[in-house]
Image (cartoon, coloured by chain):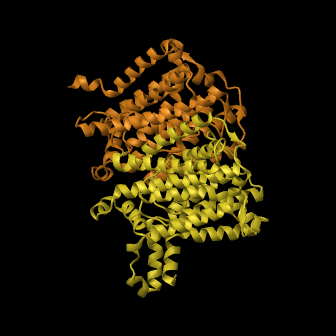
Chain colours: A orange, B yellow
Amino acid sequence: MKRLRFIDSNILILASLFLIAGLVSPHFWTPENLLNVARAASLIGIIAIGMNVVIITGGIDLSVGSVVALVGALAASFTILGLPIYATVFLTLAVAALVGLVNGSMVAHLGFQPFVATLVMMTIVRGVGLVYTDGQPIYVDYPPAIEFLSRGELLGLPVPAILFVLVTLVTWYVMRFRTIGRQMYTIGSNERAACLAGVPVRRTKLIAYVYCSVLAGLSGLILTARMGSGEPGQAGVLWELDAIAAVVIGGTALLGGRGSVWGAFVGALVIGILSNLFNLMGVDPEWQNVAKGAIILLAVLVPVARGWIGVNGDRGMRHG
Amino acid sequence: MNNYRLFRLLRDNPIVIVMVMLFALFSVIADGFADGDNISNILLQSSMLGLVAIGMSFVILTGGIDLSVGSVVALSTILVAGIANSWPPILGINAGLLAGAGIGFVNGALIAIVGLQPIIATLATMAIVRGLGMWLSDSRPIFGTLPEAYFGLANAEVFGVPVPVLVFSGVAAISIWFLHYTRTGRQIYQVGGNEEAANLAGIGVARIKILAYTLCGLLSAIAGLVLTARMQSGDAVRTGLGWELDAIAAAAVGGLSLMGGRGHLIGAVCGVLIIGMLSNAFNLMGVNPYWQRIVVGFVLALAVVAYSDAVRHRITAFRQRRRPTVASSKPPHSVLGQG
């Protein structure tokens, strides 16, 4: 059965969606369009990978959208100040890591509920970005190295998509084969048991939140490079819910301890493919909302329905 | 209300004292803050989010969460303004209320009967309802369909009190009574406190949860009706954006535990008023309005710390040292958060 498990439902969903999309719209399969899909899906996708890690530990991170906005504003203003590129990238990602550190310590050390702790940081970080820029967008000409993050191509593939795949691969490897990844699953499924088994619960949770925040920062850098501006008020609004939606569509349970990294990868792609398809078909944006909601419902209802008819699937039950 | 009950209310809801202190502080440092007009303005501004926050509180008390409230607000503004185009507005009002309650019912059924997690189920309805509203209105604001009389819902005053404030305080009073003095209200606390125990005690858990979500949808729809009167138009794209998280923040500031079963509705009301006072006072003092978010974030964090068990027990211990007779006859642990 090993061979069958490899072809899991995530890949099936993706493949069937590809087929249907191609049949519905002939433009879908053109290489430029596929690259567009990859480019568009990678922004939310990178965040969804980080969100997936936090959710596997049994938490949630609502502050990612605000981190995207703050990182964009900081990167724009640092570039205007004339900081070298590596300093800009390092400093903005360090700020993102700091937000994650505060999130993580509120959850792990102060015992806040993850939802509340990251709601606090979502409000504060958005406010910091707005105060720092006085609420105005910062327009900037990025040096080629930063523009490369969003517009560049390697071997004909867009850089954001390469980053997305790279992040997914690394996260998958760590979550599946490294001690810390396995510990995150343990904490998510039973925190007390993990603690008694000697897992450093606090440190591991902290790392999960920092990782999620840094990935949100990376996505923020790509976004600001694409727009050529830092938008403290507009960027990343409600992205946290999009990222959670991608995770949920991928079959990860919000209860923690379950779910695969590839699920979040596929979830982000599903959202990306659908919105691309709707654009190609000229469907009004309002239906995209409806479709997104319907797909979230479908993704969570299918396992429930399987339980009703007595078929156990592998979705949501996987640990790596 | 005797002495002990007042003490218990204030101990369990320090946010009331915080609100009074903030009010006193702003009255001193912000010119014109304590004027009658300004106070009624603050209340008016807070009343719409307040209605949503009360609805959210019902859901949070059962241990759930409702992310779809902002979309329900938007949908109800569209229904009222859109239907008034060709039919009498009373039809639109009823349609808005019915839609709100109906969406709440669906949320509740998805969570209590199908067994979905509240965040996921309401995230889905949030997207779907927002999309429906945009589809109904073609993503354009609807102007000029409502009669002048309808705007009275936002502008009119009764004995000098704006109508939205009356609606808000009326709903708040009835809700507090409902939660504390009716059987169903107590059952909401029981379901949130320990669902399995509530089930074993013979409470219809699914029924209670569905009721809470339905009330939440209904109150969000009422907030949408008031908002329509205030904007004098309906808009599905921009209204109610982010209200779900604002309402949750207000409830959490007020000490409602997101785990359910704990907290007093008066806390949520005070949470909304504090957020309203902050933005108003910052306006008056000419502070950069964006500081407001940072301050609200810190207030939220402080509130969580203040409502934590460690702090609560310390206060109780302090009182027990001073008044051993009262404290020993009424052990505070059995009534935590339900005073």
Image spot of residue B233 (x, y percent):
69, 45
Q: Nearer the viewer, residue B63 or A234?
A: B63
Q: Mark yes or no: residue A37 visible.
A: yes
Q: Mark yes or no: residue A247 visible.
A: no
At x 54%, y 55%, the residue is B219
Q: Nearer the viewer, residue A108 or A16?
A: A16
Image spot of residue A288 (x, y percent):
52, 30
Q: Nearer the viewer, residue A185 or B71?
A: B71
Image spot of residue B14 (x, y percent):
54, 70
Q: Nearer the viewer, residue B324 or B264?
A: B264
On screen, residue A158 versus residue B291, left or right, reads left
At x 52%, y 79%, the residue is B6
Q: Residue most toward the left? A: A1
At x 52%, y 26%, the residue is A275
Image spot of residue B168 (x, y percent):
60, 62
Q: Is residue B204 above or below residue B142?
A: below
Q: Residue most toward the bottom? A: B325
Q: Residue most toward the right? A: B31
On screen, residue A126 versus residue A39, left or right, reads right
Counting the numbered discs, the total is 0
